[in-house]
Amino acid sequence: MKIPVMEIFGPTIQGEGMVIGQKTMFVRTGGCDYSCSWCDSKFTWDGTGKSTAMKAEEIIDSLKEIGEEAFSHITISGGNPALHKGIGELINQCHEQGWKVAIETQGSFWQDWLLDIDDVTISPKPPSSLMKTDFDQLDLFMQNLIDANVSLKVVIFNEEDFTYAEMIHTRYPVVPFYLQVGNDDVLTVDDQALVSSLLKRFEWLIDRSMKSTIMNDAKVLPQLHALIWGNKRGV
Amino acid sequence: MKIPVMEIFGPTIQGEGMVIGQKTMFVRTGGCDYSCSWCDSKFTWDGTGKSTAMKAEEIIDSLKEIGEEAFSHITISGGNPALHKGIGELINQCHEQGWKVAIETQGSFWQDWLLDIDDVTISPKPPSSLMKTDFDQLDLFMQNLIDANVSLKVVIFNEEDFTYAEMIHTRYPVVPFYLQVGNDDVLTVDDQALVSSLLKRFEWLIDRSMKSTIMNDAKVLPQLHALIWGNKRGV
Ligand code: SF4
Ligand code: SF4
């Protein structure tokens, strides 16, 4: 079963969430069932990017060609990678190579292969995305993943998003919880202005989280990628 | 047994290492058996700062007064906190309150209470520190902590430090391993220049680590504190 692949690159570091800093290769799939207002990967679903249909073994070959021997961890990102049944086979083949596999998905579409992933990030989208969370789906995800190495991550742009994050963390209190600064300018090429705006927003998010007793055991993180490389792709 | 305390502050986020982003209170102890050339906490041991001898229960009271209800995690830092036997009692009392406890120490001086810590970071110092690692001590640490939630972290300033880090990671291959960008200007108050220099050095460290197959499963991280607050203390 083929997988629509937008890009394969690395090794680089994972810039976000539960495996922040981890040396990893990226496989980015095309297609998303959402259309978040601030999506930083619109090219995966808005028709401006092109995907190539690839078999699992072709992706493995490509990873080896691009990353040579310098990696042992794969991140499958999107779009929403959970749209693609074929990823199950890719995960198996990665594990055969001795590689670990991480994924991020919004928790809208279940695949049984999610149970085979080493690091699962579920990232429900807050109000500023203009998307609606299907809580029946999300409950099902969190139930199914109860024994997995799973975390929840919510991207925050404003106070309303923060309230949504508090509600999510309260609903699934035992799941490790990450707050992430939103990038509200995914087009600028002025890296220095972007860095200083992102750091200011990060400081706001830290302050806000410090005041919330609901967030006592949360982790608050920036996107390291945006700080280092701005909005550049493929790094 | 009293503990020499330099400062208690928070809640803020942990800016480094295995619990990066974690909401936490800080208890900083005085005194260090090292004198690293680039130490960013020299005031804990060079005579410019003053410590207060405090009992565990006084520290607990102070934490509650400063952090109110808005925390559930304590980071004990230094100096080298492992110099102080009295911290064992502090850990017990934190656990009685339902708080988790993290610590960072260079691995030069063993205390049995290290076995009770929830997140232990051992940070051997590379050549640029001008300190010498006692590998008998470090081997003992890593043996004792084999079942603990422990990680190794090495701060990197140059190529020689990187070679040292490769040697450390190779010596203890199963211990989660973190590379951290060194801050080579712990005095500047020009935050913007510091941020851009730290991000450049971070990019160098990422590039360097991507080329090292020894570092395939490592994590590469900046110090979030320095990026947000520069060299300011108590944040
Ligand atoms: S779920 Fe992710 S990929 Fe899909 S639109 Fe939202 S941000 Fe973009
Ligand atoms: S071990 Fe830590 S506190 Fe002690 S001198 Fe070195 S950097 Fe400073």
Image (cartoon, coloured by chain):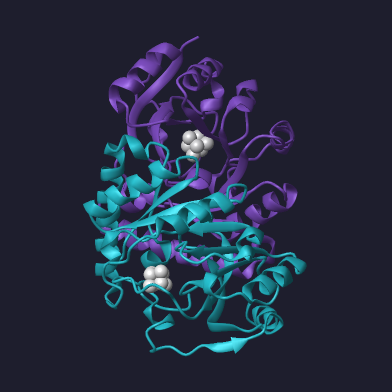
Chain colours: A cyan, B purple
Q: Position of residue A215 (x, y in %)?
A: 36, 40
Residue nearest the observer in this picture, B117 or A30: A30
* Residue found 46% across the figure and 64% down from its top: A108
Q: Position of residue B91 (x, y in %)?
A: 52, 21
Residue B200, above or below A232:
above
Q: Residue at x 72, y 31 (%)?
A: B144
Indicate which quadrant contains ligand 1.
bottom left
From the viewer's side, name the closer residue of B190 and B20.
Answer: B20
Q: Residue A147 in the image: x percent, y percent?
A: 62, 47
On screen, residue B59 versus residue B128, left or right, reads left
Toward the viewer: B184 or B191?
B191
Q: How many marks?
A: 0
Which residue is painted at 73% across and 65% down in the image? A95
| A46 w.r.t. B178: above or below | below
Q: Position of residue A184 (x, y in %)?
A: 26, 67
What residue occupies the far top of the structure in this picture? Answer: B1
Q: Quadrant of residue B22?
A: top left
Determine which quarter of the picture holds residue A27: bottom right
Name the quadrant of the N terminus of chain A. Answer: bottom right
Give the image quarter of residue B10: top left
Residue A82 seen in this snapshot? yes
Residue farthest to the front, as pictured: A136
Q: Residue at x 59, y 49 (%)?
A: B127
Query: For this rendering, which residue is in front, A88 or B73?
Result: A88
Q: Is residue A18 visible?
A: no
